[in-house]
Image (tube, rainbow, N blue to C red):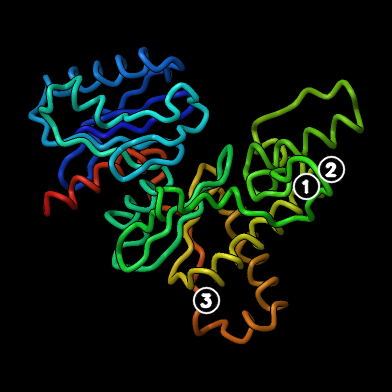
Amino acid sequence: MYIGIDVGGTTIKYSLLTTQGEVIDKQSVSTPKERTDFIDELVKIINDLSQAEKVDGIGISMPGIVRQDGYLITAGSIKALDDFPLRDTLLERTNHQYDIVIENDANAVAFAEKWIGNAQGVDNYVCLVLGTGVGGGIVINGDIYRGAHGMAGEFGWMLIDHLPEEGNIEAASVNYHSAVVLGLCQQYNELKAKDNPSFEPINDARIIFDSEETDPIAAMVLKHFYRDIAITILNLYANFDPALVLIGGAISTNAHFMDRLRETVDDYSRRHNSIAYVMGKTIGPIKATHLQNDAGMIGAVYRLHQEKGE
């Protein structure tokens, strides 16, 4: 039995998992923002779950740039954990009783899909996770590609728009165009506020999708949203030649979104002469991830499963 922990900016989800990746009695708590409180909460989770079952290891999914040794270079919105040796700290606090791995959250999603999801039997694929920002997992020859420092797969940092002449250029990045919150919702909020200064900003993209037929601003930002994700995917095709592109995040459960995304990618592919030439020969399909809210826990545990050879 394993412990799986999925750390998000607002919530920590955790559960016992079997050696087949089955999630048993998932629970959640709010994510502490201070380092000491955060570590205390993880230790409490580990102690509580290990009293119920014999635990063979602990897999933790974390936002940010995570080195393979479990050192956090960044930790997403949990700024107190930037530049922090999370794995070593937890090993010390638990008296080295357990094997512990710390995995980037998007890498964990990619791992989970390989184990018991939609990437089973696929050795080369990319996973694009659309949420507050845009994360990514790259699987090459059956294993995660991490890069030299654990930063590979930060697809949200790629630049896809005209750059400003001076100052911060990050507004031209994938995060600010293709993410659900930083991109779609933020662009919608900005345009609605210009049209109506009393407009209350929203963070729920479903409102935008539901009003597409009646709200010209919603229709416009959605058109740009699909375009920018499609451009990102075409760039991933050119860079990685994946056999499969997986789309993760809650939005991927929306069948209409997935269908329209595929249509947009197909349209743009046909308008790109070189890509059009190899369509049907090298361009992999686009699928939604199979494992939704549990993917982080499952994927982090999969690394333990791999290392133990079970």
Whether residues under marks 1 and 2 lie with C-beta atoms below 8 angstroms apart, the answer is yes
Element at badge 2? helix
Q: CA distance from mark 3 to mark 1?
A: 27 Å
Residue 163 lies left or right of residue 46; in this view the side is right
Mark sitting on residue 221: 1
Q: CA distance from mark 3 to mark 2?
A: 33 Å
Which residue is the site of mark 3?
283
Mark sitting on residue 310: none
Name above or below for residue 106 compared with residue 232. Answer: above
The spot of residue 308 in percent (x, y) is 12, 49
Question: In terms of sequence position, does the residue under pointer 3 or pointer 2 come before the other?
Answer: 2
The spot of residue 243 in percent (x, y) is 43, 71
Which residue is the site of mark 2?
217
* Residue 209 visible in the snapshot: no
* Residue 25 visible in the snapshot: yes
Q: Amino acid at mark 2?
A: Ile
Q: Amino acid at mark 1?
A: Val
